[in-house]
Image (spheres, rainbow, N blue to C red):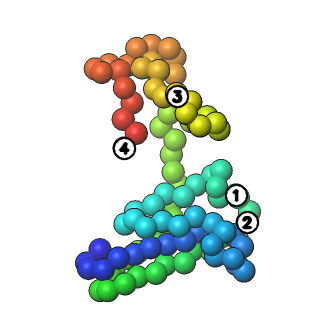
Amino acid sequence: MLQGAVALQVYKNAADPNSGVAVNAAFAVVLPPFLTFGDTWYVRVRATGLTNYTISIRPVTVERPVWAMPTTFNQTFGDSGNDSAGNPLPGDRGIDLV
């Protein structure tokens, strides 16, 4: 980004752009289960000021099993400190997600 700001919306219902997800960041990854295969999705980009942006699509490779987040509030969840085979991870035994 040069100057200014970029915001985007990803939505499925062309009649209601606010029905999807709004992203006010320089980078976003939007994937299932939010996106559904075989459906048409729309991306709206709004830029203010002198702004340069690129929209790209590429496959995402999953590096580890997906975590199911709890559906209720105030429930503890997280990294077990073990790999998918149950062996302790090296170092601090944590998986950095960023």
> Residue 98 got which mark?
4
Res 49 quadrant in image: bottom left
Outermost residue toward the bottom in this view = 49
The image shows residue 91, relative to residue 23, as above or below, that is: above
Q: Do tag 3 and tag 4 residues touch (Cβ < 8 Å)?
A: no
Please give the residue where the numbered disc 1 appears in the rendered image.
Answer: 36
Give whichever of discs 3 and 1 has the lower sequence position: 1
Q: Amino acid at mark 4?
A: Val
Question: Can you tell which of label 2 and label 4 is closer to the viewer?
Answer: 4
Indicate the secondary structure of the residue bearing disc 4: loop
Outermost residue toward the front in this view = 74
> Residue 77 got which mark?
3
Give whichever of discs 2 and 3 has the lower sequence position: 2
Question: Can you tell which of label 3 and label 4 is closer to the viewer?
Answer: 3
Determine crowd level at label 4: few under 14, some 14-19, many 20+ residues with C-alpha closer than 10 A. Answer: few
Indicate the secondary structure of the residue bearing disc 2: loop
Give whichever of discs 2 and 4 has the lower sequence position: 2
Please give the residue where the numbered disc 2 appears in the rendered image.
Answer: 39
Q: Amino acid at mark 3?
A: Phe
Q: How many marks?
A: 4
Whether residue 68 is visible here, answered yes or no, is no
Res 74 quadrant in image: top right
Query: Between residues 93 and 62, which one lies in front from this camera angle?
Result: 93
Q: Quadrant of the N terminus?
A: bottom left
Determine crowd level at label 1: few under 14, some 14-19, many 20+ residues with C-alpha closer than 10 A. Answer: few
Q: Position of residue 33 (x, y in %)?
A: 65, 50
